[in-house]
Image (cartoon, grey):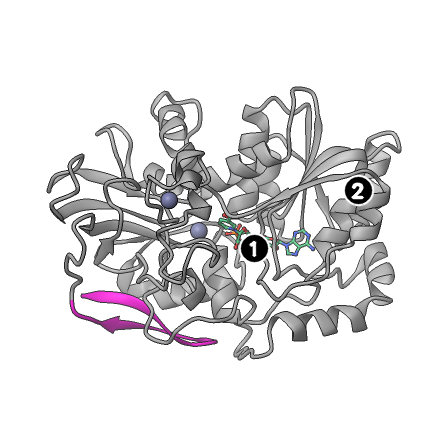
Amino acid sequence: MKAVVFHGIGDIRLDNLPEPRIQQPTDAIVRLTASAICGTDLHMIRGTVPGMEPGTILGHEGVGIVEAVGKDVRNLRPGDRVVIPSTIACGYCAYCRAGYYAQCDVANPNGAQAGTAFFGGPKSSGPFHGLQAEFARIPFANVGPVKLPADVSDDQAILLSDIFPTGYFGAELAEIRPGNTVAVFGCGPVGQFAIASARLLGAGRIFAVDIVPDRLERAREQGAEVIHFDGEDPVEALRRLTGGIGVDRAIDAVGVDAERPHRGPAAEEAGDKIRKFEEEVKEVAPETHPSNGNWAPGDGPSQVLHWAVQGLAKAGTLAIIGVYPESARFFPVGSAMNRNLTVKMGNCNHRKYLPHLLELVQAGVVDPASLLTKQEPLPSAIDAYRAFDKRQPGWLKVELRAA
Ligand SMILES: NC(=O)c1ccc[n+]([C@@H]2O[C@H](COP(=O)([O-])OP(=O)(O)OC[C@H]3O[C@@H](n4cnc5c(N)ncnc54)[C@H](O)[C@@H]3O)[C@@H](O)[C@H]2O)c1
Ligand SMILES: [Zn+2]
Ligand SMILES: [Zn+2]
């Protein structure tokens, strides 16, 4: 079968591999009809989320048809159409039963303290082969996959695998109450769904910060007030537009590959921090292999954390859903502490939110497919990765379809 395979930092390829087989009684084999490329995949190829094992199939977003089930999968049968949550969880440990599927005690073969188990991630997350392939083995298939109604399309369902639940998780972590002012940093796919979710929770005003014009335009179409950080200092803009108070809630939907501003008033301030940012890049990404404008790590790893802490109102709440590697140690704890901020963060507990969000999609409350901008056949995956990595116009969210 064809699959997108990680060979090394800056080196991914479309390979032919044997099809997976059932290994455990709770496994299923799914024939993927759609998968997608995520900002998380980019961190791994840029080298800012290290620890990938060469040979691992990438991808953690998938929709497909169940081909085979182990004897302990009693809720699915071959032929069922399912959406697969990115994180893998046992469904019976205390964490799963409390809804913390991303902190399952059982699913990660590296042990209970190893952290989130997910498809197509580094060794510390399993490793499990990912979903950018024609077929995948789904561990704990009796718990994760959710059956899809016929009137929810693949284009809608693929965004329920990771991105919509993560945006919603971010809005919930940020403690958004009706009327609150909210700043979303990053207008990639996760930021767009954080904006949509902030609206669902009744946010009064939403500010969206990024640098990519067509992504800011999408945010504006969703009703957000947009801030281009090469044109103005986002902290100054957030304060000014809120009468000097700052925002009640902020969501970091960027993570470790944050860019620092290169022009405009914010660049002058960031200029003093360039050496510190360079040290941070070394700390998080000891090995990088940029080539032809691709796979370059962000040059301001802590930039969003600083802006969010400064742009928040006193006693506001920060939700960090952008991914940082374990080696990152640069959170501005002093300013956050002295401003009485609440900080919440983590990997999304996808399975907790998926059924509810699927109902919203089926009811027509949210059409996630409206944020899907590219549908490419799986064999074109490497070119699609390059375009998404460069944030080329129109490449907001890429679905990979079975050829
Ligand atoms: N917590 C979770 O469970 C979870 C799940 C999925 C994705 N993620 C993470 O969410 C983040 C976003 O994912 P994505 O797919 O949208 O990625 P993406 O790379 O497409 O989007 C990131 C966006 O941030 C913008 N950006 C860069 N520097 C910025 C800055 N200083 N201020 C504001 N915006 C800035 C970029 O221009 C880009 O549009 C990634 O870190 C990804 O790993 C987390
Ligand atoms: Zn993802
Ligand atoms: Zn569990």
Q: CA distance from mark 2 to mark 1?
A: 20 Å
Q: Which residues are magenta?
A: 1-18
**Picture quarter with ligand 3:** top left
Q: Which mark is residue 311?
A: 2
Q: Residues within 10 Å of mark 2 (few under 14, many from 20)?
A: many
Cβ of mark 1 under 8 A from ligand 1 = yes
Q: Residues within 10 Å of mark 1 (few under 14, many from 20)?
A: many
Q: Is residue 53 visible?
A: yes
Judge by depth and name the residue closer to the eye, 70 or 20. 70
Residue 249 in the image: above or below residue 162: above
Judge by depth and name the residue closer to the eye, 111 or 58. 111
Magenta region, mostly helix, strand or loop? strand
Tell me where residue 185 appears, x and y as whole percent: 66, 46
Q: Amino acid at mark 1?
A: Val
Tell me where residue 386 appears, x and y as whole percent: 45, 67
Q: Amino acid at mark 2?
A: Gly
Residue that carries the numbered disc 1 in the rendered image = 323
Q: Is residue 146 magenta?
A: no
